[in-house]
Image (spheres, rainbow, N blue to C red):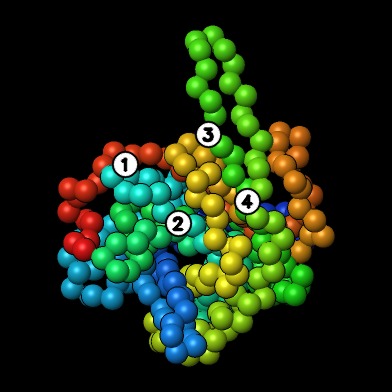
Amino acid sequence: MALTHVDIASENFQMDRLPLAYCQSWPLWCAEPNDRGGQTLRHVNPSFGDDEATAASGMWVDPITFEELWLPSDLPVPSFHLSLILVLKDGVPRYLCPAVDSTVEAGGRDWRNRGLKSVPMPKLWLPYRHLPISSMRISAYVQPAAQVLAAGEMAMEPPHEPLTVMLPVDLALEAAAQVLAEAPEDLATGFAYLSVRLPLDNARLDNALLQPGARLRVFLSDADEFPLVIDAQTDEWAWERGELDIRLTQVSAGGTSEYLPEV
């Protein structure tokens, strides 16, 4: 069944919900460290692109996805870097979520918007207010693609294996605070997403394991420990968390698409 909403966690384990139709069109900004010691902001969504004429012409498609990350067969597997997404209202953080910044390098820069379903977004958010920021940790797991079996054999889903576990997020939040202190008016008006990478060496995931058919899950929580393996018996935990849950899916080559940039 297709996802129709995002969930918002609460301390009593009851979920609030927002329909995707409501929150999918909010502008997404990604912060990148620059050589001046600050952060450079980039728009990702088409409707809020750097070039208003390009956005108005419809030459870009909406890349945001909450379920599948499409991997065109003519592009390399993207790099994946753990990040945080702050959901902002008038420039003030309302929710905090784990995420990955997925990019392909071409033409001397990193590309996020590579067409439909190329920018993964989290499906479970945490209310920002009262979060124990110093205790928050992020962990990532991959479930390899299921093996193809002979006819009549039952396939068993492999367990999720850890890619990296219990990384602190305080440095990423410091970078986010720097961005918000100097935020442009567009970021300080209405709802928006701000993506900030974790500035840690082990926050870059091993994309050798992130191949078509794999499932990537990223968790954010103040739990004292995370499981070493996630399987059918340990898949549901009684703790408050944010979550990104994305299936990597191979799709046909998009090299002739009118929506791809010329680089």
Residue type pointed to by label 3:
Ala
Q: CA distance from mark 4 to mark 1?
A: 24 Å
Amino acid type at image mark 4: Leu
Nearest the camera: 119 or 204? 204
Quadrant of residue 224 within the rendered picture: bottom right
> Which residue is denoted by mark 1 in the rendering?
73
Establish if 235 lies above or below 66.
above
- Which mark is first along the chain, 1 or 4? 1
Find numbered disc 2 in the image and state the secondary structure of the residue it sits on. strand
Q: Position of residue 74 (x, y in %)?
A: 28, 45
Marks 2 and 4 sit apart, C-alpha to C-alpha, by 14 Å
Within 10 Å of disc 2 (Cα), the crowding (few <14, some 14-19, many 20+) is some
Which residue, given by chain and number where applicable, does mark 4 sit on?
163
**Left or right placement of residue 231 versus residue 215 in this view:** right
Q: Secondary structure at mark 1?
A: loop
Q: Amino acid at mark 1?
A: Ser
Residue at 29 percent across and 62 percent down: it is 106
Query: What residue appears at the point 52 percent right and 39 percent down from the top-left corner?
Result: 214
Disc 4 vs disc 1: Cβ atoms closer than 8 Å?
Answer: no
| Residue 183 on image: x %, y % | 46, 86
Residue identified by numbered label 3: 145
